[in-house]
């Protein structure tokens, strides 16, 4: 597996914050699994964009071994079949670009109540993926799309020139097909990440404003909006270091540590499988190559979901998910 | 002292409550309430805060409200316009005193 960008430079940086594990200990907290109900499938690092906030360092150059092949895809499908996850969440890279994506959606839809597909929107824009969108409709796949900012300059600065316009066009196309429209059952959710080294605003307020402006300017509707803080890993960590922002960003995360957020963390109910079939406690641990529970396990070795009470691997990037209201 | 203003001093703001703690508590409670969403959104209040920060020329406030504006979803165009608003008022406040100058000049001139 390719190590995510930026990880090797950690040792060079002077750390001025307490290790996450120590903070948990100080608060008398133990981070262990509850009942695992979500399987996240990362099909690979291949992406048509090269976003500056990407924790994985995904991009157009990531071809070959960092993409899920049909053999691993079948192992993941078999795992889903024997485990009965309530939700399966497909991510990447741009999962649209994986050659096995149609098969994964077809098959995984039989083994879960809720299938989520994470899209950067631009990968669906050019019309060549209309059959895939048709499959989403047929299988009632929920689309969770990245849409960081209402401002074109901010969005393009994070995601690449022209991405904002393409994203707007794709959202309008998805609306025309019923996605995000009340009563159709076709869910279209947006994710807004800050376009820099700052925290996201209040989710409720950001959602309200996006709803107003997107409808007013382009007639766009959507189901729900989520705000997520950027995780200091991969390409985003490199950018923080280059700009001299890493220390202040980490301070921002660590001073917002909320012990009450720990109980609801997504890693307590989710297991993430990488493009080569190995398991992680979340997609961020995958980026950092911190294996599930600290030991390398292939999806084919698992009889079912991870056992409740099993340990969760942590490191300092975990402060992202415990900042403020938390990232669940 | 190399500089009167140090960015890290902003973090010590709460230390002002080590003395006169009741007054500090009242101030910080009031401050928090002022910037919470009300008839104005938090985003709008942050833009006003940014504007006033430039009027009072407080580097701590400019730092804090620039970041608050970004967090609340404002863009650089909106933030720049907010700074122009306060600049116009400050400039206008000087210029409107020209009327006083004209009144006095009129009184003493033939």
Image (tube, coloured by chain):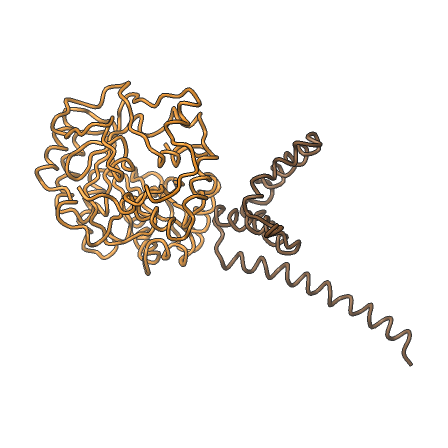
Chain colours: A orange, B brown
- Which residue is situated farthest in the bottom direction here? B110
Against A210, is A140 above or below? above
> Is there any visible trace of residue A25 in the rendered image?
yes
Instruction: Give the image quarter of residue A112.
Output: top left
Please state the horizontal and vertical placement of residue A276, each as a whole percent of the image: 15, 38
| Quadrant (top left, top right, bottom left, bottom right) of the C terminus of chain A | top left
> How many marks on residues?
0
Which residue is at a point 29% across and 37% down the rendered structure image? A284
Residue A325 relative to residue A129: left or right: right
Please state the horizontal and vertical placement of residue B42, each as a whole percent of the image: 55, 44
In front here: A286 or B43? A286
In front here: B21 or B90? B21
Which residue is at a point 34% across and 43% down the rendered structure image? A180
- Which residue is situated farthest in the front direction here? B1
Please state the horizontal and vertical placement of residue A323, each as a whole percent of the image: 43, 34
Against A26, is A159 above or below? below
Which residue is at a point 87% across and 71% down the rendered structure image? B104
Please state the horizontal and vertical placement of residue A159, each as a whole percent of the image: 33, 54
Which residue is at a point 32% across and 51% down the rendered structure image? A171
In front here: A222 or A300? A300
| Quadrant (top left, top right, bottom left, bottom right) of the N terminus of chain A | top left
Residue A306 relative to residue A21: left or right: left
Instruction: Give the image quarter of residue A73.
Output: top left
Instruction: Give the image quarter of residue A65.
Output: top left
> Is there any visible trace of residue A179 in the rendered image?
no
In front here: A226 or A309? A309
């Amino acid at each position: 597996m390719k190590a995510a960008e930026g990880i090797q430079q950690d040792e060079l940086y002077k750390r001025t914050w307490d290790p996450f594990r120590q903070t948990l200990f100080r608060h008398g907290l133990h981070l262990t699994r509850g009942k695992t109900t979500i399987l996240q499938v990362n099909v690979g690092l291949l992406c048509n964009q090269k976003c500056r906030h990407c924790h994985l360092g995904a991009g157009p150059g990531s071809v070959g071994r960092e993409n899920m092949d049909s053999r691993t895809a079948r192992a993941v499908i078999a795992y889903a079949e024997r485990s009965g996850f309530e939700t399966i969440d497909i991510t990447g890279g741009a999962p649209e670009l994986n050659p096995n994506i149609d098969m994964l959606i077809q098959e995984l839809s039989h083994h879960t109540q809720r299938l989520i597909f994470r899209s950067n929107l631009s990968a669906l824009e050019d019309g060549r993926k209309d059959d895939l969108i048709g499959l989403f409709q047929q299988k009632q796949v929920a689309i969770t799309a990245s849409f960081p900012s209402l401002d074109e300059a901010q969005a393009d600065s994070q995601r690449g020139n022209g991405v904002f316009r393409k994203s707007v066009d794709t959202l309008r196309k998805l609306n025309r097909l019923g996605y995000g429209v009340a009563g159709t059952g076709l869910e279209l959710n947006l994710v807004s990440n800050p376009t820099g080294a700052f925290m996201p605003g209040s989710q409720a307020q950001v959602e309200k404003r996006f709803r107003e402006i997107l409808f007013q300017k382009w007639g766009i509707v959507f189901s729900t909006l989520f705000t997520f803080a950027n995780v200091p890993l991969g390409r985003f960590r490199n950018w923080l270091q280059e700009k001299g922002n890493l220390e202040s960003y980490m301070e921002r995360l660590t001073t917002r540590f909320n012990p009450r957020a720990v109980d609801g963390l997504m890693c307590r109910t989710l297991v993430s499988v990488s493009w080569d079939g190995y398991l992680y406690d979340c997609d961020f641990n995958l980026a950092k190559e911190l294996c599930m529970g600290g030991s390398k396990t292939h999806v084919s070795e698992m009889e079912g979901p991870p056992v409740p009470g099993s340990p969760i691997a942590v490191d300092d990037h975990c402060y992202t998910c415990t900042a403020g209201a938390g990232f669940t | 002292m190399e500089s009167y203003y140090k960015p890290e001093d902003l973090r010590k703001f709460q230390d002002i409550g080590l003395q006169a703690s009741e007054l500090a508590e009242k101030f910080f409670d009031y401050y928090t309430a002022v910037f919470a969403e009300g008839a104005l959104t938090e985003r709008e209040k942050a833009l006003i805060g940014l504007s006033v920060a430039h009027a009072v020329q407080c580097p701590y406030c400019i730092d804090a409200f620039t970041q608050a504006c970004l967090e609340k979803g404002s863009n650089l165009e909106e933030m720049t316009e907010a700074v122009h608003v306060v600049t116009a008022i400050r400039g206008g406040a000087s210029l409107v005193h020209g009327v006083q100058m004209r009144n006095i000049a009129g009184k003493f001139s033939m």
